Image (tube, rainbow, N blue to C red):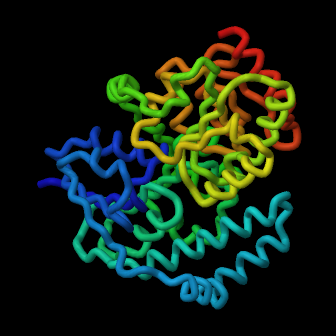
Amino acid sequence: MKKRVLISYYDFGIGGSTTSLLACLNHIDYNLYDVDLCVYENTGDLKQYVNPNVNIIEVKNKPIHRISLLLYGLFSFQLIILIFSLFFSRCKNKKRKFAIGKTQIAAKYRAKKSKIIKDHYDFGIGYLEFWANEYIYLLKNVDKKIYWIHSDYELSGLNLLFDRKKFNLAHRIVFVAEQCVKNFNALSKNQYVSKVIEIRNLLDKKTIHAMSEEPIEEPIFKGNEPILLSVLRMDLYTKGLDRCIEVAKILKEKNIKLKWVFVGEGPDFNLFQNLVLENELQNLIVCIGKKNNPYKYMKASNLLVMLSRYEGKPMVVDEAIILQLYCILTEYSSIHGQIIEGKTGSILPNGDAYDSQFVVEEIVRKLSKN
């Protein structure tokens, strides 16, 4: 008799976790498992790539008004927990941690307002932080619950106090990199060490190479200037978009001729566009929004640049390496397991040691060798 599996995910937007999910679904033996994929919204450009053996269920009940979400947050006991935990915390960026805490609270509210699936499942897998994990936690008809976390738990600002109940009842807690496992075990004082495992993101090399051969319509890739490429979620602080602006300003001052193309969308897309205009960088930086196929742009670029303040194990780096695109990256937890320094990429200082001038020098040095 087949085992029944429910996997929860928010939607089919562009991103490394979505690519990982799609690859994971292609590796399941459907002779052994019946799989339902539960999404909050059945939207996003990548839904067409879901394995045909998978049944997709949308559980968004009705639109959630900002006022109701705000009232829930204001009168939630979790908000008090968040404020007190930050008051006694030694973390440097309390503003960022508060913002992530609010996102965790909002995710809990969205999960509670979603349609609850009443079927029985042998396994329930939350394939991403926030809503996906919260939704699986709420289900009473799941024998074993597994929570996937694609970022470095501590560095991302996630609040462990909000997740303890989930983790106490979890069958497994999955991280995508060894260093993320170590950091989480240290943070939780090994309370969940018997449950925590590493499962690296899956990649389909044949698909990546095939998609990289598709033609490019954007004229910016048909010029003679070198191309820097950033494929990311437009989150100003996390992805270091403010750092990108500073690097671009130095490149402009030095009269370095190139184009810097940003692929992706996110909460700070418009803010980043405004910063580009304010600093008169529109002749250097070009944002082309989210794309189904980032691989064709990777093949047509000279360097992948990522100046994130933290990462889990970004799939875009592995994908770039598959396509032999050299990466210039600020250091993160799992980077030494992905990058061979000087061969597949350059690892630059992060945190207090970060230096925009040094980033510019590395970009110029690598371009001069190409």
Residue farthest to the left, as pictured: 1
Q: Is residue 84 something one can see in this rendering?
A: yes
Relative image position of residue 156 (x, y in whole percent) = 67, 54
Residue farthest to the top, as pictured: 369
In the image, is 251 to the left or to the right of 302? right
Relative image position of residue 212 (x, y in whole percent) = 40, 26
In the image, is 168 to the left or to the right of 247? left
Which quarter of the picture shows residue 78?
bottom right
For the N terminus, the quadrant is bottom left
- Placement of 290 over or under 321, stated as above or below: below
Which quarter of the picture shows residue 345?
top right
In the image, is 44 to the left or to the right of 151? left
Residue at (78, 22) in percent of width and height: 362
- Placement of 61 over or under 123, stated as above or below: below
For the C terminus, the quadrant is top right
Q: Is residue 154 something one can see in this rendering?
A: no
Residues 6 and 221: in front is: 221
- Placement of 130 over or under 235, stated as above or below: below
Relative image position of residue 254 (x, y in whole percent) = 85, 25
In the image, is 64 to the left or to the right of 287? left
Residue at (87, 37) in percent of width and height: 353
Which quarter of the picture shows residue 154?
bottom right
Residue at (42, 32) in percent of width and height: 217
Residues 233 and 133: in front is: 233
Relative image position of residue 102 (x, y in whole percent) = 65, 73
